Image (cartoon, rainbow, N blue to C red):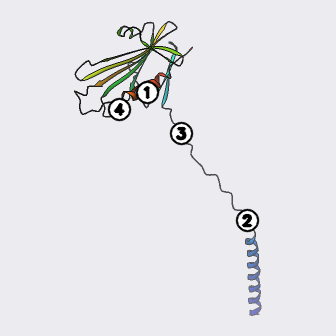
Amino acid sequence: MWIKKRLSFFVFVIFWLAACTSATSQETPLPTPLPTETSTPLAEESEFVTYRDMKNGFEITYSTEIFTSHTDNSKPGLLLLVLNTEKLFPGQNLENVVVSVSAGPVCRFKDIYYENPEEETINDIKFSVYSTRDSGTYSNVFETLTYQTDHNDLCYEIHLNIREYSLTAFPELSEYDPEILIIEFKNLLSTFKFIE
């Protein structure tokens, strides 16, 4: 009797193992992995800002990496942009650079310039180009570059005002590269357009 019970238990175990083996030997598909969640990076704020003066009909686009809008002194018809000299010219003799973009019935800077200026066309706009350089004081040198044009009975001016330290007064500074400054100014100029 005891052997019969042992034998039936043994047969049960064999059947059970056979059943398990055949079930596991069948190919079961691997579970489909769930899609991985990826976070979409937030859209970065553009470093470029377009200033539009609808009243005077012009726009200009500037880089916030290069220029800071001087809103305290800006007003309709006059945008003031301050060049980031610390970033572009660290340890060099460039003290201050301001670009003013203006529109009005009278040219703001016409009286200080000579006659027969150079001419330059940008975005199909013909500009008269004036420049001055003055070693005003022992410690400072002043330079200006102005692009003027007339349109719809208004005078439009993009005026670059440069104030640099004299290397005689500040020999510890190195001389800045004016070509880099002019490239940044021309990049700004190339975005000036009339809004019709």
Where is residue 121 drawn, in percent x and y? 50, 17
Dot 2 amino acid type: Thr
Question: Which residue occupies the foreground of this view, 179 or 136?
Answer: 179
Where in the figure is residue 35, as x and y percent of width and height? 64, 52
Upstream in sequence: badge 3 or badge 4: 3
* Residue 134 rendering spot, x and y as whole percentages: 29, 17
Callout 1, which amino acid? Answer: Ile
Q: Nearer the viewer, residue 22 or 107?
A: 107
State the residue in front, 111 or 103. Answer: 111
Characterize the local packing of mark 3: few (<14), some (14-19) or many (20 or more) Cα atoms within 10 angstroms. few
Which residue in the structure is indicated by mark 4? 89
Q: Residue at x 30, y 25 (%)?
A: 164
**Residue type pointed to by label 3:** Leu
Residue under pointer 3? 42
Label pair 1/3, CB-CB below 8 angstroms: no
Q: Is label 1 or label 3 in front? A: 1
Of pointers 4 and 2, the one earlier in the residue sequence = 2
Give the labeled residue for mark 1.
183
Q: Secondary structure at mark 3?
A: loop
Q: Label 2 belongs to which residue?
A: 28
Q: Give SS at disc 1.
A: helix
Q: Residue at x 36, y 30 (%)?
A: 177
Which of pointers 1 and 3 lies earlier in the amino acid sequence? 3
